[in-house]
Image (spheres, rainbow, N blue to C red):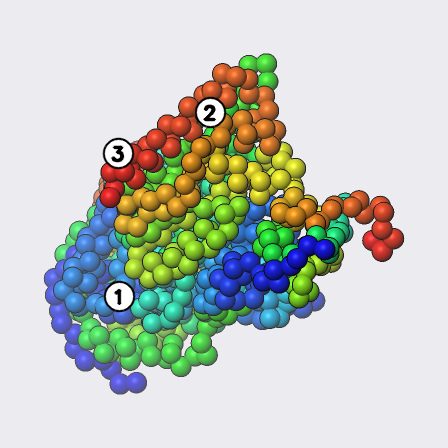
Amino acid sequence: MVIKHKNIFKTQSAWSNADEKMLCLDTGSWRTSRPVLDKDKCNYCGLCALFCPPQCMNDMGDHYEANLDFCKGCGICANECPRKAITMVPEGEFTDG
Amino acid sequence: MVSAQKGQVRVITGNATGAYGAMLCRPDVIAAYPITPQSEIAEQLAQFKADGVIDSEFVEVEGENSAMNVVLAASVAGGRVFTATSSYGLVFMYDALQETSGFRAPVVMVNANRETPGIHAVSSGQQDMISARDAGWVQIITENDQEILDQIIMAYMLAEDNDILLPVMVNYDGFYLSYLAEAVEIYQIEDVDKFLAPLKKQSPRQKLVPGVSQGCGTHGMEMGYVEARYKHTQAMERVKNKVDEIDKKFGDYFGRYYGGQIEEYRTDDADIIIIASGSATGTARTVIDAKREQGIKVGLIKLRLFRPFPAERLIQALKGKKAIGVIDRSICFGWKYGPICMELKVLTQELGSVPILSYIDGLANLDITIPHIGRVVDEVNEAAKGKPYQDVTWIPMEE
Amino acid sequence: MVETTKKRNRVFNYFCQDEQFAGGVAWCAGCPMELIARLTPKVLGKNMIFVGTPGCAAPVLHGQNIGAWHRMAYLASVMTGVPSKATGLSRYYNRIGQDATVVCFTGDGCATDVGFQPLSGAAERQEKFIYLAYDNEGYMNTGNQRSSATQIGAATTTTPVGKIGKGKSNAQKNMPMIMLMHKPTYMATATVSHLEDFIKKLQKAKEKSKEGFVYLHLFSPCPVGWRIDSSKVIEVCREAVRTNYFPLWEAENGKPRITVNVANPKPILEFTKLMRKYSHLKEDGLAELQKQVDERYALLKTLVNAGT
């Protein structure tokens, strides 16, 4: 038998290793609407960031901004914001998506 | 390495021997759940712990499935582990058996062979072990109490070898050996330490350590899965020679040799061969001697390694023989032959058109007696002369 | 302009470790289990090790060949072996003096159904690890089949609503109460709408897991299976607490204590109206559900009052 396969695992057993290969999905592409912040209403309480399931709200020092690479557009930040400072806007209204 | 000191000779049961064997190898974690005919091992190990003879973590699990999972995880974390079971206990471990071999965890387990199929049977038979043959484990069958002890020590040497890294199941006939008390030499623990010391000199195997980025039990995706399976089967192939090597080293040090994968008895000049395994081989030797005196040139092969199947050693030992009789203590659903016989039949091309006769005997605690084996020898002898023979014989059904 | 406090929520102060997961992972939009999975390592810190199993968490906790979705040490298991594997790990780490917080991360199907035996066994033996069950009341990863954690009346793919079928006909197994009877060193119910409560319980869990068995039961509604608008998931958690559908409590050594008191519990409709899994329920169905909720809460209250 001629083995052409190049080994994926270095060891006998099949283990994963993030140092060698960290996987990541383009979950930003799932989004149908994106969170848009009205900075005037925001008081930097951080609830949007705490409740965000993918934990993808970046701390900007005086407000939070969703990392659109990963934001799935669930809308929890908008729904939970005590000051209603976040609005979910359909992706169709943006040209960068 | 010089030879070991003389150990203490004690008259103990096969089960107690299993516990002593484990004790001598200093496992880090032991988990065991009671089941007839194995329960005494769990009890004995618990007593060792209570008496301070061992300092292992001892987990009194709530079932066999958990027993295997406990030792599997402790093994993956880097520990030396031990467990014991039998029959439905082995069946209840089935998912964990697959993981243990798939994770390449060097777990050592003794299994007191007991019947297992749908009908409940609290009696001896190798059906449990046969039902687990495709779980990716190394399976070794032992014949007497001393061999149980010796094989456990050899099992760690095999399982933890970096070239192998596979779980090893040490089997012995339940009831026959589990409750049979005979003289066993229990080696000095320092000598066992010395014997197993080379394992520590290897480069450390992969271990699951908190705080280190690593996942044990990753999804094998496509070629990842294929590669893992290929490596597993290659390791299984390496087991065969390794078993022979370890047997030699063990014999040189402790003074007892078992022949490695198979033990041959009066096979050199034999025309016909009987293949047996486990406790029945003792009876078989008596019959072989008697038949030799009657002028029948018969030899015996004791099958020690069942998984991987010792094909090369068997071909070497059986080449040129005129007929072969195989005694199985279990059945093989879907084939009329017994399981060991069925596996041997794969070698038909290498062995030529030699008659291979399958005998099913010793199910459900029925003894494989001297007359039974005598009959096998006589029939195989007739087949060797070219006489017609019966393919498969259920000996107790014809009595 | 609204005056900003310029002070972050104090919950952030509980975090002692950075994000351990990749930014984008295969969990559904709005899933509270994703939040639980991401927050747990942040609170428990280094030397935490997850033991996981097939279920919603598996596609991310398990690696794919050499690749991994997170930076933690992880052991994969079949559903029947999770607490036993955690036992093996914690016993061995304890033996060699390796600091470790072993956390089983399973769904309700594993905890209450197929993996219950080893869970009960490990609790009885007071094994030193944390068993964290995210309860989405069914087998969501396989497509919303019922588990014994599914509540009465709920429509699932194996308890569908039809001409005769009215959703699940039996009441939910009262899992937190079953675990309370095991008298674990520490146990708690929690949910992500009450984050500080949840995080404090996680911290306590870590501390107590050095002494004995810890069980955490986390309410984690499934936006897909329960048919909830993904933005309303945290609201559903909150309403579950406010209706006493999922009361928040903890127990040390078997003595329960309510951690979030609900002064005037809302009627169950305030919870059920947020999802479609109960949308077929008429007045009698809702009354039956209300009865289950009231009975369970009354039992909890009785034990709380008796346990002091």
Where is residue B2? Give x, y as percent. 26, 85
- Tell me the mark number nearer the camera, choosing from 2 and 3: 2
Residue that numbered label 2 is attached to: C289
The residue located at (59%, 14%) in the rendering is C163
Pick whichever, B388 or C197, lies toward us: C197
Residue that numbered label 3 is attached to: B399
Amino acid type, label 2:
Leu
Q: Secondary structure at mark 2?
A: helix
Amino acid type, label 3:
Glu
Where is residue B35? Give x, y as percent. 25, 46
- Tell me the mark number nearer the camera, choosing from 3 and 1: 1
Where is residue C272? Give x, y as percent. 55, 29
Quarter of the figure with the N terminus of chain A: bottom right
The residue located at (17%, 68%) in the rendering is B53
Instruction: Decide: is C217 above or below B162.
Output: above
Chain on which label 2 sits: C
Find the residue positioned furthest to the top.
Answer: C163
Pick whichever, C251 or A69, lies toward us: C251
In the picture, measured across the screen, residue B232 lies left or right of residue B187, that is right
Residue that numbered label 1 is attached to: B56
Pick whichever, B244 or C174, lies toward us: C174
The residue located at (65%, 44%) in the rendering is A79
Quote the CA–CA distance across marks 2 and 1. 50 Å
The residue located at (37%, 43%) in the rendering is C258
Amino acid type, label 1:
Ser
Q: Secondary structure at mark 1?
A: loop
